[in-house]
Image (spheres, coloured by chain):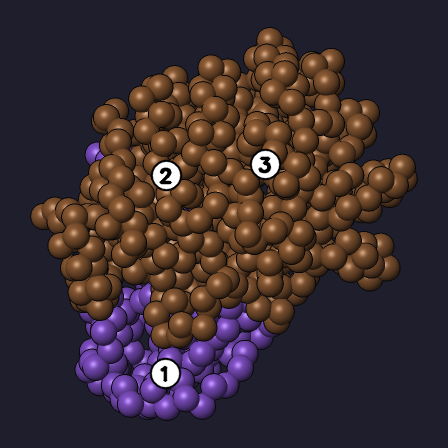
Amino acid sequence: MSELIRPTFDVDLIDRYGGEGPRYTSYPTAVQFSDRFGPEDFLTAIDESNRLPIPADLSLYVHVPFCSSPCFYCGCNRVITRSATAGDDFLATLGREMDLIAPRFDADRKVRQLHLGGGTPTFLTVDQLARLMDMLRARFTFADDGELGLEVDPRTIDPSGIKRLREIGFNRISIGVQDLDPAVQEAVNRIHDTATVSATIGAARAVGFESISVDLIYGLPLQTTTGFAQTVETMISLKPDRLSLFNYAHLPHLFKGQNRIKTEQLPNPTTKLAIFRNALSRLLDSGYEFIGMDHFALPGDSMVKARANGTLVRNFQGYSTHGGLDLVSFGPSAISQVGDSFAQNHRKLPDWRIAIEEDGHPATCRGLTRTTDDRVRAEIIERIMCTGTLVYADLERFFQLSFRSYFSGELQRLAPLADDGLIEWRKDGFTVTAAGMMFLRAIAKVFDAYLVPNRQQQGRFSRIV
Amino acid sequence: MSDKPSISEIGQKETSCEDCSLFNLCFAHDISADEREEINRVLRRQQPVERSDHLFHGGQSARTVSVVRSGSVKAYQLSHEGDEIVSGFYLPGEILGLDALSNEKHPGFAVALEDSRTCEIPFKDFVSMLQSSPKLNQVMLRLLSEEMAETRELLLVVGRLDARTRVALFLMSMSRRLARRNQDPDQFRLTMDRRDIANYLGLTIETVSRTLSALQREDVIEVRGKLVRVLDRSALEEMAMRVDEGSRRQATG
């Protein structure tokens, strides 16, 4: 196990390399998905995946689209409702969606991971979540040591609820905190006091949740350096195993809900950078390790081990410790990845429901199947994002190509990044440096074949720093 | 079977067996020049077969004897209950249809595992050549004897050996046959479904995958998608060695 690199902070480099870039939770990114890819293609991909010598085990994702009130910063696909029947109706359709998909997978393919995201998974009551787990268990075989996690909104659940989540099988938890400053909370319409957050984390720890994770967001309206520093100090004292520090992307033309954020309340770029810089150095000084992009974790956590021994991977939830799984996703807008195919469901709840209930087929509305070129680049990008090291020979062996000639253009475009100290050439590859750690996306971007020719995608991706 | 004009055209450029990259592997290499010339006159080169298309069906009168030119082919029989029983996999240079010689009907089925090409000799021409060509006869006897030995080995594999040995033997057989084709013996694609491998070896699909996973955990092989890489050749050989030396000799070639 090697020492993890501590990223350095350089304003000049941020100026040059902190621009927009995809988050590379997949490659190609979802922007490339085509509506020519439909339900039949998804089912074919599943059938093909069963044929492999060692079919991949499974990672399941369920998108619970509901929230009872809108957080103004949110860019996720969600439905704001207080309807009492929404949850039960949703579960009924979800059951049918599972019936269309689960039986296609050979029964020896075990579920190693489950994640519930949203929206707000805890919009569902614990009883409803228990039912959801029963529905999944009735249709899939779960590995004994699977990682079963969900996102929790501290406003929607109390410590006894957390205890019940553990009892129904969840063992990983991610808590959305964002910011503890009351003024910021009011500006983004998400109000919960520090005591609630502390009680949620405490309860999760007491009942044996592993890898307790907390999300924070910097760049929110009314945020100040001192205010956010206070949030960071409180979080450090609560010691979540993992902490994500997301950069708020203000893209109201893409996410309508963000129109309710007052632009004049947003911190200016200098303040935002200072907020980030302080948070970064405080987290590192307090013993958190930098995983990559916006992820931090305490040394004992499995993600730090995975980062150090090169088994870290990237998926739609960000970084993950478990690679080589086929991802099977349920619910509106959810994206599956089976073999080399991506399949995304209809984004809107009614469209998703009609496809399943009336048309009787999976709700796939777009997707793509990767070409060999896509696969090589996906592998390169994942290695840059997850291990920070690329060894050409590893790729040459599997893809039977000569790296230096296949990627001669990319290597040329990497040269200035090497001159600026973001990467360091090695005999047969390159390594990301401490200075480059902040700009993994900028380095990975060089290998993105879909970004090179046109500049029309400006404003589609969030800033890197 | 579909006829893609573009592929047929490519096939026509190669006008004699001597030009073929598989010549050294093919039975055509071992027969006399006169016999080869006779075959060249009737041979249909590089006929395209799409994945999942059949070369022939069981019970059908034999129309051709085929040599795999590229791709791979699965041979199978149907049980009385209608279940598929996989009897072998054919790689480039290997000949199919000899088992129809006794009653001019194919006893089993042959289906392409991927988009492939075959060189086809009309069955009638082949039979009449056999009656007049001593060298061809000799070569065919050798091939039939080899097939017989392989079938016996398969019976042994399915009947008596543990899963690990069966899987190791299968991987070694693929590796050896590819090596003979001047391909990397330590890295190859398994074009058949795991169902086919399981069926062929008399194992369940779960056992095939579990055994491959175990070999992977032990760093004997690495499996990515359909690609298999042999990391520890001697370990794999040792596993396969548990079989009686005599029955292995043929497969080693």
The residue that mark 3 highlights is A184
Chain given the colour purple: B
Packing grade of label 1 (10 A; few <14, some 14-19, many >=20) is many
Of the residues shown, which amino acid type is indicated by label 3? Val
- Earlier sequence position, callout 3 versus callout 2: 3
Contact check, label 2 and label 1, Cβ < 8 Å: no
Relative image position of residue A445 (x, y in whole percent): 34, 58
Q: Secondary structure at mark 2?
A: helix
| Chain designation of label 1 | B
The tag on residue B101 is: none
Chain A: drawing colour: brown
Residue designated by label 2: A274
Q: Is residue B252 above or below residue B138?
A: above
Under circle 3, the secondary element is helix
Which residue is located at x 51 percent, y 51 percent? A249
Quick check: A241 left or right of A126?
left
Q: Both on one chain, marks 2 and 1?
A: no
One can see residue B145 in this view: no
Q: Quick check: do tags 3 and 2 share a chain?
A: yes
Which amino acid type is shown beneath numbered disc 1?
Answer: Arg
Point out the frontmost of discs 2 and 1: 2
Residue positioned 37% across, 90% down in the render: B9
Distance from label 2 to label 1 (Cα)?
72 Å
Q: For label 3, count other residues whose C-alpha is less than 10 Å away and answer few (under 14), some (14-19) or many (20+).
A: many
Q: Which residue is mark 1?
A: B45
